Image: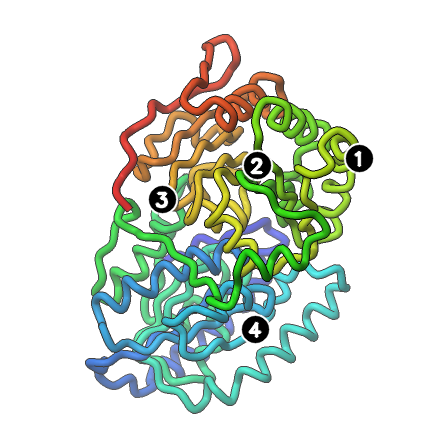
């Protein structure tokens, strides 16, 4: 089949050259391997070498697989930075850590990332070599795929996408669901599941995240400098890529209005130095006026503790990143998409108000009916700020005028969770 590679010519030309030699090896040797029959209790190896949001939504596959195969054994290939998402998941038997150099956002050199990739792969090899898997599913359609592990383990049926090289190691090479690229990423997951006998629709997916039972309000408050006052909202002003950030003044303006017009406290959340810088700016502008109602939890709380906080929050205000996917499982969420659209729209249990600038996603009818989508030509405007503030402080009294350049998909009844 013809492969449609993902990336610039600088990225794809080396992949084509690599595939020329891999195709020869597969034709003469790898394809002749003994596969064997699929077991009644299958072992499934799921590869997801992306980031934390990917790891979370991939975990939604696990109960779906168990519904079809109740005694299935599930192992995952996942990078070290996703450990917090996976470590308490009851469906996972083994976590095989591989830090793919293409997905590594650490502030280290390219060569150090390659060395880390090799080191983690070498550490995973003993488990791969002794296992026999019925199914291998790689969810990645771009950047780093895991197909290079296949010659080092026994897999009876390997399924993945052919856009990032080494596709001939797969028994089933899939194309992305739609060539225009404007498809929800769970459609790609569904295409993988279909190849192992499972039919699933995006609207039927039930998101979840297991929280450690040892975590409590008391244990969280012991880490914070200020007492956590209810009711509160969570603010996650960071994302994995800096070009998706909003300005300090945007967040400060919204928080000031919320604090003035309501009795909400605000918990400022984040995990990186970039988040700490944003939060410091917010605190400097609001602390003197609302010292007891602005709680700095940045770089203090774990992912598990943040998930627990979201179960107690009235709202979460986020960007298009892992916190959005996490928070909408447990509370009503307002999220801002500065550089992406439909492919990453949230899979939510609770209502979501979503702003985005993605032209290809303008006017799409999203099948998760509890997500209200607003297309904006610009995001950092008084009108967007007003809608967010009114959504939080005056529920269901948001007025959107045609002159604002904000396009609204009519709200549907919330689907049952």
Q: Are marks 3 and 1 in contact (CB under 8 Å)?
A: no
- How many C-alpha atoms fall within 10 Å of the one at disc 4: few (<14), some, or many (≥20)? many
- How many C-alpha atoms fall within 10 Å of the one at disc 2: few (<14), some, or many (≥20)? some
Q: Which numbered disc, 3 or 1, marks the residue closer to the eye?
A: 1
Q: Which residue is mark 3?
A: 178
Q: Are marks 2 and 3 in contact (CB under 8 Å)?
A: no
185 is higher (above) or lower (below) than 215 = above
- Residue 289 quadrant: top right
- Residue 277 quadrant: top right
The kind of secondary structure element at disc 1 is helix
Tell me what residue is drawn at x 38 percent, y 44 percent.
Answer: 348
| Residue 309 in picture, x, y percent from top left | 53, 51
Instruction: Return the disc, 3 or 4, that comes first in the chain's sequence.
Output: 4
Tell me what residue is drawn at x 46 percent, y 50 percent.
Answer: 311
Q: Which residue is mark 1?
A: 284
Give the distance between the C-alpha atoms of the residues marked 2 and 3, in whole angstroms. Answer: 20 Å
Instruction: Return the disc, 4 or 1, that comes first in the chain's sequence.
Output: 4
| Front-most of residues 117 and 235 | 235
221 is higher (above) or lower (below) than 130 = above
The kind of secondary structure element at disc 4 is loop
The kind of secondary structure element at disc 2 is loop
Give the distance between the C-alpha atoms of the residues marked 3 and 1, in whole angstroms. Answer: 47 Å
Give the distance between the C-alpha atoms of the residues marked 3 and 4, in whole angstroms. Answer: 29 Å
| Front-most of residues 194 and 335 | 335
| Front-most of residues 78 and 137 | 78
**Dot label at residue 227:** none
**Dot label at residue 98:** 4
Q: Which residue is mark 2?
A: 339
| Residue 10 in picture, x, y percent from top left | 63, 53
The residue furthest top is 403
144 to the left or right of 34: right
Tell me what residue is drawn at x 55 percent, y 39 percent.
Answer: 233
């Amino acid at each position: 089949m013809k492969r449609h590679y993902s990336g610039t010519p600088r990225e794809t030309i080396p992949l084509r050259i690599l595939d020329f030699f891999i195709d020869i090896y597969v034709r003469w040797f790898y394809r002749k391997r003994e596969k064997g029959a699929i077991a009644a209790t299958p072992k499934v190896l799921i590869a997801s070498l992306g980031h934390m949001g990917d790891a979370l939504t991939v975990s939604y596959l696990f109960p779906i697989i168990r519904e079809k195969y109740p005694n299935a054994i599930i192992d995952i290939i996942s990078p070290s930075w996703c450990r917090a998402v996976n470590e308490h998941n009851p469906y996972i038997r083994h976590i095989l850590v591989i830090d793919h150099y293409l997905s590594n956002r650490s502030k280290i050199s390219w060569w150090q990332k390659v060395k880390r990739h090799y080191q983690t792969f070498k550490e995973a090899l003993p488990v791969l070599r002794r296992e026999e898997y019925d199914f291998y599913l790689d969810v990645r359609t771009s950047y780093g795929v895991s197909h290079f592990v296949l010659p080092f383990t026994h897999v009876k049926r390997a399924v993945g996408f052919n856009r990032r090289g080494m596709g001939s190691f797969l028994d089933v090479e899939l194309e992305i669901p739609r060539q225009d690229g404007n498809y929800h990423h769970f459609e790609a997951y569904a295409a993988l599941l279909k190849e192992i006998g499972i039919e699933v629709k995006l609207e039927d997916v039930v998101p979840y995240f297991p929280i450690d039972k040892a975590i409590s309000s008391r244990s969280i408050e012991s880490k914070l400098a200020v007492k956590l006052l209810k009711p509160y909202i969570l603010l996650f002003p960071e994302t994995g890529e800096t070009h998706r950030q909003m300005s300090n003044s945007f967040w400060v303006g919204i928080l000031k209005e919320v604090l003035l017009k309501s009795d909400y406290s605000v918990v400022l959340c984040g995990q990186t130095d970039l988040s700490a810088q944003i939060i410091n700016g917010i605190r400097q502008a609001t602390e003197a006026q609302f010292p007891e109602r602005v709680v700095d939890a940045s770089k203090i709380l774990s992912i598990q503790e943040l998930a627990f906080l979201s179960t107690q929050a009235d709202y979460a205000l986020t960007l298009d990143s892992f916190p959005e996917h996490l928070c909408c499982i447990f509370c009503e969420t307002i999220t801002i998409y500065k550089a992406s659209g439909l492919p990453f729209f949230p899979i939510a249990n609770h209502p979501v108000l979503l702003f985005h600038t993605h032209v290809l996603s303008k006017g799409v009818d999203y099948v998760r009916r509890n997500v209200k989508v607003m297309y904006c030509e610009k995001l950092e405007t008084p009108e967007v700020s007003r809608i967010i503030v009114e959504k939080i402080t005056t529920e269901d009294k948001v007025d959107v005028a045609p002159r604002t350049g904000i396009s609204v998909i009519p709200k549907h009844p919330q689907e049952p969770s």
